[in-house]
Amino acid sequence: MAEITESKNFIHAFIDEDIAEGGRYAGRTVHTRFPPEPNGYLHIGHCKALIIDFGTAEKYNGLCNLRMDDTNPTKEDVEFVEAIKEDIHWLGFDWGDRFYYGSDYFEKDYEYAVELIKKGLAYVCELTPEQFKEYRGDLNTPAISPYRDRPMEESLDLFARMRAGEFEDNKYTLRAKIDLASGNFNMRDPVIYRIRHMHHHRQGDKWCIYPMYDFAHPIQDALEGITHSLCSLEFENHRPLYNWVVENVSVPHTPRQIEFARLGIDHTVLSKRKLRNLVENGYVSGWDDPRMPTLCGLRRRGYTPASIRNFCERVGVAKSPNTIPYAFLEFCLREDLNETAQRVMAVLKPVKLTITNYPEGKSETVTVENNPNRPEDGTREVTFSRNLWIEADDFLAQPIPKYKRLYPDGPECRLKGAYLIKCTGCVTDENGNVVEVLATYDPESRGGDPADGRKVKGATIHWVDAETAVDAEVRQYSNLFDDADPDAAGKDYLSCLNPHSLEVLTGCKVEASLADAKAPASYQFMRLGYFCPDSKDCAPGHLVFNRSVSLKDSFKPGK
Ligand code: ATP
Ligand code: MG
């Protein structure tokens, strides 16, 4: 498992205080939880929460529970539960045997609600949703709650009948009796139970009343013995209610809620609802479309757990909202793959290169390094012959200033790992398009650059032997959204979609060693970027690669 950085963040500072002598959790094991709502796949924002929840537990030799927050019966979908588990394991985190469902506590939630009624701290209200809004008051006016003083016995009776299914949806609610004049509207006698005649994916039709998140969540935390309930900033205003619940029902523990800023990334949306919309309306091929910011999408794109964890750790834990450039996520991936990915040669937009003074029918092998950063990865043999494929843009019939690649009578260029060649001309079709580049080689120059010590003015060019090359499809991706902030409030994110976010190249030529490539694997296609076999569509005989990330492009003419 990758190491969690030791840098102090404010959450750790709070925890240090709490577990110090005399602190509220002195002598206790630090215990956190990750509570995803199983209504979609995890995205990179959840990774940040995962790293905070599981990473904090790791740092303190504590525990982290995985709890499906399925309190709300409207949205859960069992399909997502397994996917969420798979994604968390893939990132390298483990909850051991501490896997829970929020809905498993419904009976307990009910008991605690009854306890509140008996203590005079909750009552059954019969305002309609419209009236509820109307009576909410404003900062200068307290809320009005006409049923607040309903006798306890009557509330108990009504609540039992609510559970028994006697009333239709919204007819009654159970409200906590807190403070109608509070400056925090969440404390103005919030609804803690409502009637919903809905099927629950695990509880079936057992319940027709459901607890509100603000009531259920602190109880779940407390029952599981969570010490630190870490959540995103939108729950800050709910903390007083969280504390109120924990203090007023007889739960065995008193967890502490601490909030952190949500992760935002530019050029993408991080909301399951919006991501789901992209999937359901066919804007992308699925939750695991390699352009999606979901964990399964990033994985299919070629992101590694280490790159994502590094990214989240470096972004750090902040108290104020922050949007991180997508380019930084790419930077973290490049950094990881630079260390680990095997170098291979692939030509994406091929043109034929004929070495006119190389004997026809001859073939030889040259040796190339698998990864210059890891000599221990060794070398491999690549075949070389008279007919090669090179990138079409490594040749220009008419050179432009500072162009150091192939052009007629241009400089000597190194074919990576093989010979020096000099371009002598080209063959064009009737429309003037280049169909073949011609060159001569220097038989004395064999050897990897700069093995023979010869320095040349021209660039080093990648190539693939036409005799042994394998065809491949390559999918190149760019931002799913043109707009830097498609997630901004009020923006129509669908109108910000980049129509060119996927470019499919067919007829690409890759070296023979890739003939059996399959996911998971990452390669650096020399001079082009990092690519991975597509986990769904790549098969022997039909190679499909995704571009994970480009290299920093230092090969542009003029540089
Ligand atoms: P979404 O809006 O995408 O549905 P959510 O908060 O409703 O997100 P949950 O499944 O409830 O999704 O989230 C599980 C945990 O992940 C919560 O603790 C939540 O705070 C956290 N989380 C979700 N999105 C982010 C984010 N962008 N950055 C940090 N944490 C996040
Ligand atoms: Mg949520």
Image (tube, rainbow, N blue to C red):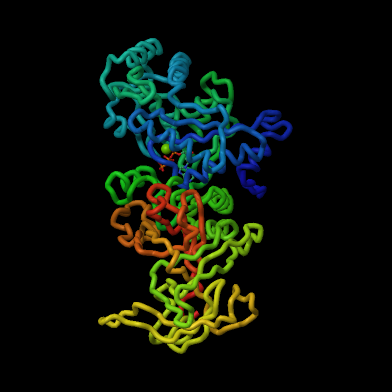
> x%, y% of residue 94?
56, 35
Q: Nearer the viewer, residue 220 or 129?
A: 220
> x%, y% of residue 520?
49, 49
- Residue sitting at 63 percent across and 38 percent down? 58
- Residue sitting at 71 percent across and 35 percent down? 20
How many numbered discs?
0
Q: Is residue 94 shown to the viewer in this render?
A: yes
Q: Is residue 324 left or right of residue 13?
A: left
Q: Is residue 478 shown to the viewer in this render?
A: no
**Which residue extends farthest right?**
21
Q: Nearer the viewer, residue 26 or 280?
A: 280
- Residue sitting at 29 percent across and 80 percent down? 429
**Which residue extends farthest bottom?**
409
> x%, y% of residue 209?
35, 21
Say which quadrant the N terminus sits in.
top right
Image-quarter location of ligand 2: top left
Q: Is residue 282 left or right of residue 346?
A: left
> x%, y% of residue 216?
45, 26
Q: Is residue 98 above or below residue 355?
A: above
Q: Is residue 358 above or below residue 145?
A: below
Q: Nearer the viewer, residue 137 or 192?
A: 192
Res. 544 image quadrant: bottom left
Res. 266 image quadrant: bottom left
